[in-house]
Amino acid sequence: MGGVGTEALGEGLFDRVSRAEGNVMSVFRQVCPFHADEDIRGVLTGSEDGSVSFTCTRSRGHPNGGPHAWLYVPQPDGLPGIDGYAAELGLATELPVAIAQYRRQWIEYGVAERAYALQCPADFAAIVIRYGHTAVSPKQYTTSAFLAGALGVLSKHGTVLYHVGPATGRWKYNGTISWWTVAPAPDWESNRLSWSDSGQDMSYVPGAADQ
């Protein structure tokens, strides 16, 4: 089994672009994994985790046809690396299986997180102990950022499919958030399950205060 590694998380290289007024803006760029000559400029999603969305707009050469989108979630310095831990947890296998429970639907990130938590409760609890969760107490880099980062690696290579969309319910503080599915991609306009529409609560998070 291939592990979820740092190769995509670590390659979110950026250029520092100086503005005339003296401000500095980070411009994230990544290369499409299916077109080595296609350098893609990322777009900040607006989520608190600082995630960046990339889309290669070429219509050919991608595993699922049409444009290919993926997510990059920066990891703060000084935290345990995602590389070995994600592989140890088997996230390259477990996350797609969790999302596939909702085959033929785009699901908001919270729905995907809950599906994984119920599928692998001991592993999810261990991640919460390591990284925390906003349902327990406010924190910038959390379990959700860690799992979204792992999903981002998988999305870059087409193992899961990514779409940026509206954040709902208890996640709406993000404004926008990642949505996930597995191939074949369902229609974005008609086949979506938001966190609000799922009718679920945060009781799947050990120690959650907001349920």
Image (tube, grey):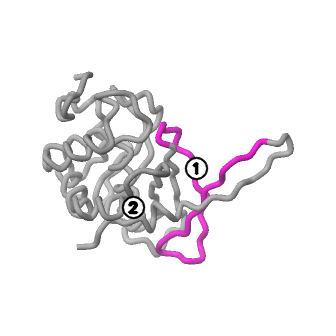
In the rendered structure, find residue 43 and report the number of the disc placed on it.
1
- What is the number of the mark on residue 60? none
Q: Amino acid at mark 2?
A: Val
Q: Is 106 drawn above or below residue 68 in the view shown? A: above
Considering every residue shown, the one lying at the far top of the view is 210
Q: Position of residue 196 (x, y in %)?
A: 29, 28
Tell me the element at label 2. helix
> Which three-letter amino acid code belongs to the residue tagged 1?
Val
Q: Residue at x 25, y 22 (%)?
A: 209
Residue 140 visible in the shown view: yes
Residue at 54 percent of width and 60 percent of height: 12
| Along the line of sight, the residue nearer the viewer: 54 or 143 | 143
Q: Residue at x 51, y 44 (%)?
A: 50
In the rendered image, the quadrant that contains the N terminus is bottom left
Q: Which residue is mark 2?
A: 153
Q: Are marks 1 and 2 in contact (CB under 8 Å)?
A: no
Residue 158 at x, y percent in the picture: 36, 65
Farthest-out residue, front:
78
Element at badge 1?
A: strand
Left/right placement of residue 43 relative to residue 87 reads right
Q: Nearer the viewer, residue 140 or 172?
A: 140
Residue 190 appears in the rendering: no
Question: Quick check: is 1 in the magenta stretch?
Answer: no
Mark 1 against mark 2, which lies toward the viewer? 2
Where does the C terminus fall, quadrant-wise?
top left
Against 142, residue 207 (above or below) is above
- Is residue 45 inside the magenta stretch? yes
* The residue stretch that appears in magenta: 23-49
Q: Is residue 32 left or right of residue 125?
A: right
Question: Where in the figure is residue 103, as x and y percent of width and height?
Answer: 21, 53
Which mark sits nearer the N-terminus, 1 or 2?
Answer: 1
Seen at 29% across and 38% down, the residue is 110
